[in-house]
Image: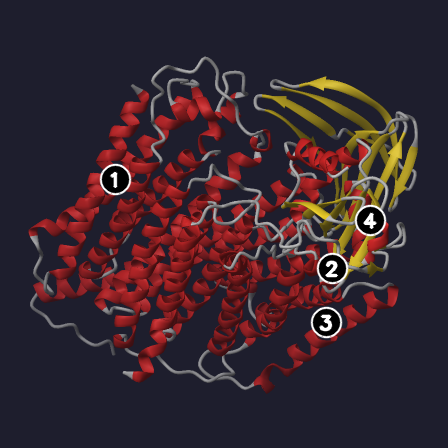
Amino acid sequence: MIAEIGLAALWLAAALAVLQMVSGALALRSAEGEANPLAIYARPAAVMQALLAGLAFAMLVWAFAVTDLSVKLVAANSHSMKPMIYKLTGTWGNHEGSMLLWVGVLALSGGLIALFERRLPERTMGATLAVQGFVALGFYAFLLLSSNPFERLPVPAIEGSGLNPLLQDIGLAFHPPTLYAGYVGLSVAFSLAMGALLTREVNPTFARVMRPWVLGAWVLLTFGITAGSYWAYYELGWGGWWFWDPVENASLMPWLAATALLHSVAVLAARDALRTWTIMLGVLAFSMSMLGTFLVRSGVLTSVHAFAVDPERGAFILVLLGLYIGGAFTIFALRAGAVAEGKRFSFSSREGALVFNNVMLSAILAIVLLGTLYPLVTEAFDVRVSVGPPYFNPASAMFAIPMFLVMAVGPLLRWKEDSPRRIRFEVLLLAVILIGVIGLVSFFGQFALLPLLGLGLAAALGVAAFLPLRGRKLTRVPVATWGMVLAHFGIAVSLFGMASEGAFTQERLAAVAPGGSDQVGDYTFTLQSVNPVAGPNWTAIEARIAVSRDGGTPVILTPQARNFWSPAQSTSESALLTRWDGQLYAVIGNQAADGRWQIRMWWKPFVTFIWYGGLLIALGGVLSIIGRVRVDMKRRKAVSLGDERRADLEALGTAPVPAE
Amino acid sequence: MRSRLFLWVPLALFAFFAGLAGYMLTQDKTEFVESAMIGQSLPDFALKPAFDGLPGAARSDLVGGQPRLLNIWASWCLPCIAEAPQLEALQAQGVEIVGIAIRDRPEDVANFLARHGNPYTRIGADDISEVQLAIGSSGVPETFVIDAAGVIRYQHIGDIRESDIPILLAELEKAR
C-alpha cells in the first residue's frame, strides 16, 4: 500500500501542477483590476501540490525504513541488515529517490512562495506560479514516465543488494538534501524572474521579494558544497578536498551564478539599477542547476558520482532543458529590451565594484562551464580529453584575484558615485598587508605562486572584511551588514585554508612494521597493532597508530580498510586528528610481503579553515536573511499602519492634515 | 533593433550546447576508438626521466625480451589514481610496465608514486605530448601492449578496471 499511496500522491501533484499553471497563466492574462474566476486556484494548487509531493517522499522514506523489498528501488539499493540511519538516507542515495527529493523541494518552494508572498502584483504572482507549475510538471513527468521510484517487482526480492559503501556515511544525510534544497530553491528566483519579465515589473519591490529566496538557496548551496567537500576529503581517502570533478563543478556553477545574483539583486533593491542583468542571472542560476542535473544523470560526462546511466533519461532531461532554458532565453531575448533601463551610476561607486565582481564571477562561471563541457565538445570529434587542475586553477585564479582585490574595497565605496581618494588610507593599508604577507612568507621558503598569492589575499581580505564597520557604532550596525562582514570574512578564512593546505602540506608514505615508528611534520607516529574488526555490515583491518606531537601525550588514530559484503566492495576509512592549527590525516594501505604495513600520513596545516570559512559564509547569509526580512516586515507594517490611518481619517471625513 | 541582438546570445549558446549534447546522447559510447598505430612499429623516441627515482624511457627500452605494457598517465589525472592498484596487480604478475608521464612535474610524479604505489620500471617525461600523439593516444590514462619486436599490438583506453586485467594478460600472452 505504501508505494501505491506515494504513486497516487505523485500523480495528483502532477495534476495540480497543471491547474497551477493554467490558473496562473489566466491571472497573467486578466487585465488590471479585474480577476479571472479561475485565477484564484493558483495559490491553493501550489500549496496542495507541496503537501502531496511531501507525502510521496515520506512514503518512499517509509518503504526504505521498513525495507519493503517488493519495491524495486528498495531491493536495488537497500538491505535489511543495514543500520537504520543508512536505510533512511539510502532513500536519496540513488537516481529515482534523489529525483523525488529534487521534485519535492521544487514543490515545497512553490508552496512556500504561494503561501507567504503578498507584495507582488497579482499578475506577476500569477505568472510566477504558472512558471513554477510548468517547471514542476516537466519533472513530475520525468519521474512518472521514466524514473518511477515506486515501481513494484513482480516477485518481491529475498534480500536487497545494499547501498554503495562509499555512501554509507553520515555525510549522505546532510550533503544531498541541503544541496538539492539550494539547487531547487533557485527555481523560485527563476520563476520570479520570468514572472517579472512577462509583466515587465522589474523594480526594487520585485528585487526585495526575490532576495530572501536567492539568499536562502545560496546559504543552502554554500553549506551543501562545504559539506560535500569535507565528505569527499575524508571519505575518498585521497587527501584532497576539491577535484574539479564534473559533479563538483555542477554544484559550483549554480553557486557562482547565485553569488553574482545575490549581489546584483542587492543593487536592484537598493538602487533600481542592473534590471536586465538581474533577470539574466535569475534565469542563469536555475539553468545551471538543471544543467548539472542533466550532466550527472545522462552519462554524457564521466565522473566519480556515477548515477545509473541511461541515455533515454538523458534525452528526457535534455528535452526539459530545451523547454525551460531555451524557453526562458527566448522570452529574455524578446522581452528584455522592453524592460526600462535602470538608474545609471559611475564606475567608481559601490554599484561599479559590484558590477565588476559580477562580471568576474560570470567569467569564472564561464571558465568552469567551458572546462566541464570541453570533453563533450572534443568527444564529438572523437578526441577524448580530461580537463583537470592545470586548466581550472590558473584559469579561474586569473579572474578570482582581481575579484578579491575589488571585493576588499567595494563595500567601502559609496553608492552612485564616489572618489577613490576618499578611501586611500584603507587601500594603502590593505596593499601593505598584501605585500607584507607575501614578502614574509616567501622569505621563509619557496612556495608555488597561487598559494603564496592566496595567503596574501586572505590576510588582506580578512582585515578588509571588517573595515566597513570602522567608525560606526557597532550596536547600530544593521544585521544584514553584519551578515556581509561575516560572509566576506568567511571567504578570507576559506582562502587561507586553501592556500595553507597548498603551500605547507607535508606527507609521508611509510612501510611500518608493528612497533615501528616514523615521522611527518612535528608528529611521530608509531604503529602499535593491526587488528581485524567487524561492523554491522562490514569487516575491516584496523590499524592502531599512536601519534604524538613533539614528544607530547600520544593520541590513538584508527584508520581502517573496510570490506563490505552487500554489495561486496572495499573502502578506505581515513582517521583524522584535528588540532586548531591543522589536521593529521592517516590512511592504512596494503601489507607488504615482509609483514610491514603501508601507512600514509599527511599533516595539513589549517586545512580545516576551508570548511570553517564555508560555514562562516553560510552563517553570514543567514544573518543577512534575518536582517532583510526584519526590515521588510517593519516596512510592511509601517505601510499598512499608514494605510489604516489614512482610511480612518477618510472615514471621519477629514483630509489628512500635514504635520506642522 | 540591432543593438538588441546581444540579447539572443544566451539562447544561441544554449542552442549550441543542446544540439551538441543531443548529438552526443545518440552516439554509442564505445570505449574502443583504436589508434591508427596498432599493428605498426613503435615510433622512435627517447624521453628524459620524469623524476629522480627512475630512469627515463626510450623506444629501445621497450624492444626485445618479453612483451611489455606502455602506460600513458599523469599525476594530475583522476582515473590514474583509480587505475594504480590494477597496475600494481599486473606488476605483481610479472608484467614489466613502462610509464610515460604527460605534462607533469617531477615533484608531482614522485608524490603520486609515493601515494598510490609505483608499478613502473621506467618513466619518461613527455612534456609536450609528442610521444603520446605519435603513438595515437588521445588521453590519459591509456595502456599499450608492445611486443618484443617493438610493434604496438593492443591499446586500452581509459583506466584499467579489475575486469580488464585478464584481457590485458591475454593480450600480453598473444604478443609473446
> Considering only order in the chain, which callout, 3 or 1, is on the residue closer to the N terminus?
1
Pointer 3 and pointer 4 on the same chain = no
Numbered label tally? 4
Percent x, y of residue A233: 66, 43
Which of B67 and A106 lies nearest the eye of the viewer?
A: B67
Name the subunit of mark 3: A
**Discs 1 and 2 lie in a common subunit:** no
Closest to the observer: A405 or A509?
A: A509
Residue identifier under label 4: B62
Dividing the picture into quadrants, the one containing residue B59 is: bottom right
Q: Secondary structure at mark 3?
A: helix
Q: Position of residue A422 (x, y in %)?
A: 58, 84
- At which x and y percent is residue A296? 48, 46
Where does label 1 land, which residue?
A: A49
**Would residue A575 be seen by someone viewing this image from the given angle?**
no
Task: Check residue B131 in the rendering and tell me which mark sits there, or answer none.
Answer: 2
